[in-house]
Amino acid sequence: MSLDILLIADIVGTIAFALSGLFIAARNNLDMLGLFIISFLTALGGGVIRDIIINKVPSSFSNSTPALIVIAIIAVGLLFKLHKKSELENHFLFILFDTLGLVSFAITGALLAIKIDLQLIGVVFLALITAVGGGVLRDMLLNKVPLLLKSDFYGSVALLVGAMIYLLHTLDMTTSFNILIVFAIGVSIRFIAYYRNWHLPKL
């Protein structure tokens, strides 16, 4: 049951990240190729980096579903000119989709790290990379300081989720129900951080 929910959340997250890439590409006046590259990097880049790190063929290359989802979102976005409606980025549903993707990607990364017997640092790192790696690649390609390094509690949520999954593993409590609890906690923390404008201390 939890795996089904995580799969759905992964799909929803891919949709949100692809839309985010579409908005950013439009904001930077990119051409169609640039639009596709930025959208693909934002939605799928984190998983590609994760799989390369663990010496695995990226699932986005062996499974066509994620790429088809991104292409479909780009097509729908262009058809309905969503990229010209910047207010959508702050809409509740977009924040919800983005949050579901962030947390589910972090859990996926953490579980894969545990599967190959990585320790705490490896688990937390892969959770972070899976969740936000695509956004970091996107920002670097656009010659910008990655939002991960200067924005709100976004990356911290992925780190906390990875740590909670590792704790469940060490306590031998990695059940479907407990993973769902971690998922709910991660989503809740992200929403609280977003609406209360939480930030880590800055220099």
Image (cartoon, grey):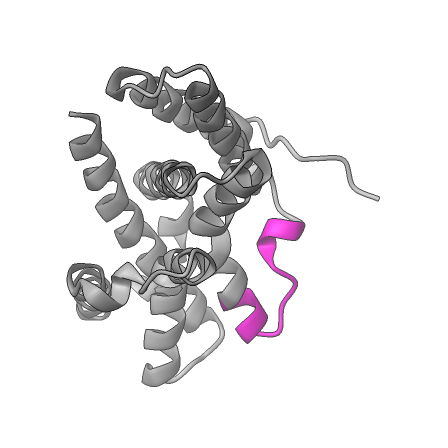
Q: Residue at x 15, y 60 (%)?
A: 65
**Magenta part of the protein: which range?**
138-149
Q: Which residue is drawn at 38% across and 85% down?
A: 31
Q: In this view, does 91 lie to the left or right of 160?
A: left
Q: In this view, does 181 lie to the left or right of 73?
A: right
Say which quarter of the image contains residue 34: bottom left
User: Is any atom of residue 81 visible in this view?
Assistant: no
Residue 35 percent location from the top left of the image = 36, 76
Q: Residue at x 29, y 52 (%)?
A: 14
The foreground one among 129 and 188 is 129
The foreground one among 126 and 146 is 126
User: Is any atom of residue 150 visible in this view?
Assistant: yes
Question: Does the stretch in magenta take in 47?
Answer: no
Q: Residue at x 54, y 74 (%)?
A: 141
Residue 134 percent location from the top left of the image = 45, 60
Question: Does the stretch in magenta take in 141?
Answer: yes
Q: In this view, does 59 lie to the left or right of 135?
A: left
Image quadrant in which the C terminus is located: top right
Residue 109 percent location from the top left of the image = 40, 43
Image vertical order of residue 166 relative to residue 153, above or below = above
Image quadrant in which the N terminus is located: top left
Say which quarter of the image contains residue 20: bottom left
Q: Residue furthest front?
A: 117
